[in-house]
Amino acid sequence: MFPDGWEASMTAQVWAYARVSTRDQNPQLQLDALAAGGYDTLVTEQESGRRGVPRPV
């Protein structure tokens, strides 16, 4: 029904996101839980959620 190898290109990629609000907080518990669940790509943030503070792109 599909060309060879086509099904493999349709697999979803799992992204994980860990965030803490201040630089003195430790995201390790979140990272451990995400690792236990498995992911393909990990994104982390250690920034303030205050209004006016630019977020990374």
Image (cartoon, helix red, strand yellow):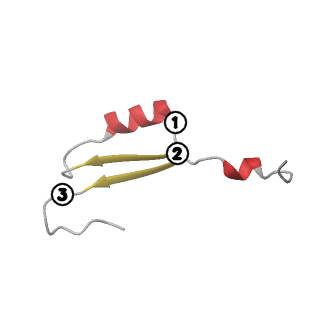
Residue carrying label 2:
14
Give coordinates of residue 43: x percent, y percent. 41, 53
Mark toward the start of the polypeptide (1 vs 2): 2
Residue carrying label 3:
48
Q: Residue at x 71, y 53 (%)?
A: 9
Q: Secondary structure at mark 1?
A: loop
Give coordinates of residue 8: x percent, y percent. 74, 48
Q: Residue at x 59, y 47 (%)?
A: 12
- Measured along the vertical axis of the image, is residue 29 above or below residue 42? above
Give coordinates of residue 46: x percent, y percent. 27, 54
Q: Residue at x 13, y 60 (%)?
A: 50
- Measured along the vertical axis of the image, is residue 20 above or below residue 30? below
Q: CA distance from mark 2 to mark 3?
A: 25 Å
Residue 47 relative to residue 43: left or right: left
Identify the amino acid type marked 2: Val
Residue carrying label 1:
38
Closer to the observer: label 2 or label 3?
2
Give coordinates of residue 35: x percent, y percent. 47, 35
